Image (spheres, rainbow, N blue to C red):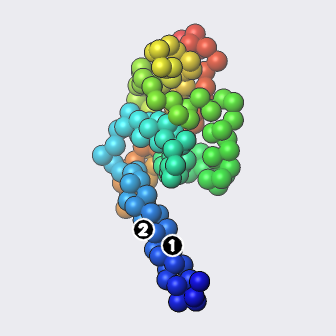
Amino acid sequence: MTQSLRYTLVIFVLAAIFTSLNAKAQELIFPNPDLSPRQVVSIQLKALADVGNEGSSGFLQTWIFAHPRNKAVTGPIERFALMLQSPDYVVLLAANKHKIVDVYQKDNSAFLFVDILNQRDELVAVFRWELAQARLEDNSLVWMTTNVRRLLKPDDLT
């Protein structure tokens, strides 16, 4: 292979990588005041269900909506992604069926209960999502996740 051909190939590969990264970045949804707590959780659940697909930005999309207080505890995105692969949370990855069953909102806090279902619509896990409003640089308030807790059994809802 000539040096010119090698150089052309390298440029082509780099262009493809940057185009792919740019396309993925354009697909990401960022916190904004128009999103309700239910929409934020739906965005995160959809992103986590996509994690197993090639080129997925599911961990990044989920992390974008993590509240700064949450990020302080979970650490950088690499550690956040490892946490989501732990036994308590792995059921969220590739979970194509979920149902947000209850939403409780008061002032700048919200609590959502999410059922994770298998392909036969049987309950396999219940999670409590906690959200709080965070202030962006432009001074607007947005909903972001402060905590996600897997409930051991559905009785924990009461």
Element class at badge 2? helix
- Observer-nearest of 21 and 13: 13
Q: Quadrant of the C terminus?
A: top right
Label 2: how many residues lie within 10 Å, few (<14), some (14-19) or many (20+)? few
Q: Nearer the viewer, residue 55 or 101?
A: 55
Secondary structure under tag 1 reads helix
Residue 134 lies, with reference to residue 14, above or below; the image says: above
Residue, disc 2: 19
In the image, residue 149 lies at what x, y percent? 60, 29
- Up the image or down, 7 lies above or below 81; here it is below
Residue 67 seen in this snapshot: no
99, above or below 47, in the image: above
Q: Nearer the viewer, residue 92 or 21?
A: 21
Amino acid type of the residue tagged 1 in the rendering: Val
- Seen at 52% across and 49% down, the residue is 54
Alpha-carbon neighbours of circle 1 within 10 Å: few (<14), some, or many (≥20)? few
Image quarter in which the N terminus is found: bottom right
Left or right of 3? Residue 96 is left
Q: Nearer the viewer, residue 83 or 156?
A: 83
Residue at image mark 1:
13
Q: Is 105 above or below relative to 72?
A: above
Q: Amino acid at mark 2?
A: Thr
Q: At which x and y percent is residue 89? A: 62, 32
- The numbered dot on residue 36 is none
3 displayed left or right of 18: right
**Residue found at x 61% / y 14%:** 153
Residue 34 percent location from the top left of the image: 30, 46
Mark 1 to mark 2 CA distance (whole Å) = 10 Å
In the figure, residue 27 lies in which quadrant?
bottom left
Q: First in sequence: mark 1 or mark 2?
A: 1
Q: Is residue 57 visible?
A: yes
Q: Which residue is situated farthest in the left direction here?
A: 34
